[in-house]
Every structure is written in C-alpha cells, then in structure tokens.
Image (cartoon, helix red, strand yellow):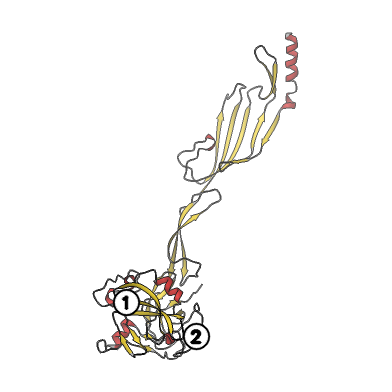
C-alpha cells in the first residue's frame, strides 16, 4: 500500500513546469484609492494527506516561494497615510515614493510575500492669488475685496484659496478746464472723489448751466467752487440742451460734464456702489454743519454742496444737503439723483426736477 501511495506522489510532482503560472488581477477602485497591476505568482502543485484521509491536491506553493504585489496609489500631501497598512510618518510631502513590505513564513505552506507601494503624492495648495483689474470691472466680476474660493484638484487635494480682487485707479483726473480731481477706487469703479467744477465739455463747448453756490450768507464764490464744486441741471450734466430729449439709454455711457475717459454714473452704478452705505459713511465730518454723525468711512467724501432750485432761481441748504445726478431720465421733467441729507442715514435714489442744480461725480470708463 505504501508503494501505491509513493507512486501517486511521484505522479503528482512530475508536471511541475506545466502547472507553474502567473495570474494577473485587474485594477479596481476602493475608497478613492486606485490599486492597479497586482501580480500573483503561483508555484507548482503539491499533495498532502490529512490524518486518516486521502491525499488532496492544491494549486499552491510546494516549497518556500515568494508572492509579490505591486500597488499604485494617489494621495495628497501634508496628511497621514495609512492605506494598505503602510504607515509613512506623520505627514508626506509632494513627490513620487516607493515602499516595500516583506512578510516571511506567512503560512503553513511556507511562502513569503513582498508588497511594493508606488505612491504619487500631490500637493495641497495654500495660495493667495491676487487678480488685478484696471479701472472699472465688467459686470461679471465682484467688487474689490477678498473672496474665499474652493480650489479643486484631480486627486481630491482640495483647498480654500483667498482670491483678492484689487481695483487700481489713477490718483487724479483732469477735465478740459485743467481742474484736477482726486480719484477713489470704490466697489467695482474708479470715482472722482470731488464734485465736478468744469465749465466746458470735452470738445471745449460751453456747459449751459454750471453754477457756483452763492447766497448772502455764503457769498464767497471762489471758495464755494473749490470746496463744493458746481451745480448742474440734469440736461447740462449729461450734455443736452436745456429741456432737450436724450438719445441714450439707461445703461449707456454718457460723458457729459466728465473728463475724457469718464462718464456720468448710471442709476445702476450709483445704486450698486453707494446704496450699500449709510449717509454718515459717505459724508465728511467737516463738509457739513456741526454737529453731525459723519465718519466718511467709505472715503467717498460727500460734502453738503447745497442745491439750486431751477423754478425759484435760488440756492439753498449749503452744508445741509447734497444730491448727485445719474443719467436716468424718469420723465420729461424729472431725472434720477442720489440724495444725501444731514442727520438722515438714508441713501436714496429719487426722481428730481431735471432743471434743478445738483452735483456730479464721475466714473472711469471701462478699459478692458
């Protein structure tokens, strides 16, 4: 009986070359990590006898052999990595890494294993990007400021980036009469920081109504013009003859009394930029009657330039009130202006009589 068993064993061990083989396992994805190209090398057939039983044949390792596996993985920098039981310090940095793990005498069949990890580490971005736009920004861009942006990457190394939008303006603007005005970047636009004083349009033609505040109490015309600018009817402000009919729309760029390259604000531009503030944040403390609560935190530097009543032909309310024309005509006799008053926090866009005299601020044209 022993001879028969010996012959059976010999027969099972003869075709070892025929039974040696390589098996390729396809890559698969699990938990966001990709494991590819895993090769398992199987050894020759062998036989074993259980106690009191028959022989069993296994497709396995008949002697000490090595099973090798290669794993390709992607990961993000500056975080722990413990996948596949590989522990790589506290953090890993950007780059390509190879790690090997060897396990000897790992089973009753006396095989060992070698696992190779090919690790690609991708960066986590910690950036502060500055995007600079010159002068006024297109409507699709935000106002100047800092905006957190979610930065997505191919391997999930997402980060939060501070996107800083800055508006750069020339420091001054000069009209055709050589009056120079300070300039303020505010919101998405470059604004003149002072009221217009021009007496001529850009083509050197005379502005029909460009008034300096004058009254018995405030009779210093030269000082009033320097401090408060001139008061224009809506028609003069937008470059029309008095009581003329506009040929422009509510969103058109209208130069009017502004310097070349500048325009009178539309109602939308005025509302977008200034109605987010209180009157106190737009007004200067020293340009209004005292006491007042003005802080001028916006740096817009509105002063109480007063108004001119076109029907009554008189000036009133210097140091107590101001208004700024927009290009929007409401009706044949009224147009939209932004109104500011002492001790009133409201910043109001309201219809005003088009032949009244109010101040004008200008916005730089788009240059993009």
Q: Which residue is drawn at 45% across and 40% down?
A: 90
Name the residue tied to disc 1: 341
Residue 163 locus on image (x, y percent): 45, 60
Residue 11 locus on image (x, y percent): 75, 18
Residue 277 locus on image (x, y percent): 36, 69
**For mark 1, does the 10 Å Cα neighbourhood hold few (<14), some (14 to 19), or many (20 or more) residues?**
many
* Left or right of residue 98, residue 193 in this image: left
* Left or right of residue 125, residue 5 in this image: right
Name the residue tied to disc 2: 246
* Left or right of residue 108, residue 179 in this image: left
Callout 1: SS? strand
**For mark 2, does the 10 Å Cα neighbourhood hold few (<14), some (14 to 19), or many (20 or more) residues?**
some
Count of labels in the image: 2
Which residue of the protein is positioned furthest toward the top in this rendering? 1
262 over 70 or under it: above or below: below
The image quarter containing residue 351 is: bottom left
Disc 1 or 2, which lies upstream in sequence? 2
Callout 2: SS? loop
């Amino acid at each position: 009986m022993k001879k028969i068993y010996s012959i059976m064993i010999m027969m099972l061990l003869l075709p070892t070359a025929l039974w040696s083989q390589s098996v390729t396992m396809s890559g698969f994805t699990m938990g966001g990590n990709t494991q590819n190209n895993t090769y398992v090398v199987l050894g020759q057939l062998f036989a074993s006898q259980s106690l009191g039983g028959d022989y069993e044949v296994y497709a396995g390792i008949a002697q000490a052999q090595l099973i090798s596996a290669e794993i390709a993985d992607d990961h993000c920098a500056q975080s722990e990595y413990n996948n596949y039981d590989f522990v790589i310090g506290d953090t890993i940095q950007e780059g390509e890494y190879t790690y090997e793990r060897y396990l000897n005498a790992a089973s009753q069949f006396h095989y060992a294993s070698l696992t190779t990890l090919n690790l690609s580490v991708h960066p986590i971005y910690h950036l502060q990007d500055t995007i600079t736009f010159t002068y006024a920004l297109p409507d699709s861009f935000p106002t100047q400021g800092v905006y957190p942006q979610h930065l997505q990457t191919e391997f999930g190394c997402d980060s939060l980036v501070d996107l800083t939008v800055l508006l750069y303006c020339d420091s001054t603007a000069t009209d055709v009469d050589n009056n120079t005005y300070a300039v303020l970047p505010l919101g998405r636009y470059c604004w003149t920081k002072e009221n217009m004083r021009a007496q001529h349009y850009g083509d050197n033609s005379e502005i029909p109504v460009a008034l300096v505040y004058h009254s018995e109490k405030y009779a210093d015309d030269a000082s009033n013009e320097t401090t408060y600018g001139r008061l224009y009817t809506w028609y003069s402000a937008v470059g029309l003859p008095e009581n003329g009919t506009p040929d422009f729309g509510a969103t058109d760029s209208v130069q009017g009394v502004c310097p070349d390259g500048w325009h009178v604000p539309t109602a939308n531009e005025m509302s977008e930029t200034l109605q987010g503030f209180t009157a106190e944040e737009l007004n200067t403390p020293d340009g209004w009657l005292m006491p007042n609560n003005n802080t001028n935190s916006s740096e817009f530097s509105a002063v109480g330039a007063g108004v001119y009543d076109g029907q009554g032909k008189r000036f009133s309310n210097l140091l107590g009130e101001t208004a700024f024309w927009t290009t929007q005509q409401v009706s044949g006799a009224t147009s939209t202006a932004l109104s500011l008053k002492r001790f009133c926090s409201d910043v109001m866009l309201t219809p005003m009589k088009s032949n009244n005299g109010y101040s004008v601020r200008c916005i730089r044209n788009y240059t993009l």
